[in-house]
Image (spheres, grey):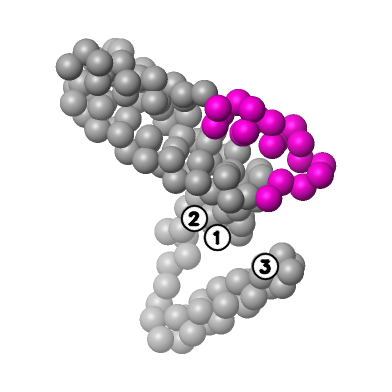
Amino acid sequence: MRNYKIALVTFLMFFSLCHAAETTSMNLSDFNNTERVQINQDASTTEALKSRFEAIQSTFKTQQHLFSTKQISESKYLKHLKKLRKKELKLFKAVKRHEFGADEMTDYNFWHQGVLKFPTQIEQELLQYASNQ
């Protein structure tokens, strides 16, 4: 089924590009790697879920560093944290819906015995700011 979806998406992309090339001139060099990865990678695979989590955590660490070095204001930092928390919650819903295979018990435990069981750093940071106000 997955191969069918990949083939269908590939065909539709090819068809769309051919049709677009006939009607308009298109500069494909403007596409970046992130867009290509998102098109080619199924968002519900175990690897994709973990990759999304790592990206959120990386962004959090960057924002935390920017705030600690006073490169962004507290209000901007909190705004970024709230956006990241929304992304986390959306990701967690996808993880709860995901069916882990028998060979993915380590990944299942990572999510259900770790990440989903305890507050994340983002949630802890937001709770700390909420209790200080």
Q: Residue 45: x percent and y percent?
A: 65, 50
User: In the rendered structure, does residue 103 fall within the stretch colored magenta?
Assistant: yes
Q: Are marks 2 and 1 in contact (CB under 8 Å)?
A: yes
Q: How crowded is mark 2: few (under 14 residues within 10 Å), some or many (20 or more)?
A: few
Residue at left 46%, top 34%? 56
Instruction: Give the extent of the magenta segment.
Output: 99-117
Residue 48 in picture, x, y percent from top left: 61, 46
Above or below, 113 against 49 in this view is above
Q: Do callouts 3 and 1 mark residues in contact (Cβ within 8 Å)?
A: no
Q: Is mark 3 on a helix, strand or loop?
A: helix
Which mark is drawn over residue 35?
A: 2
Residue position marked by numbered label 1 in the rendering: 39
Which part of the image, by quadrant, shows the C terminus?
top left
Q: Tag on residue 6?
A: 3
Q: Nearer the viewer, residue 64 or 113?
A: 113
At label 1, counting other C-alpha atoms closer than 10 Å, the crowd grade (few under 14, some 14-19, many 20 or more) is few
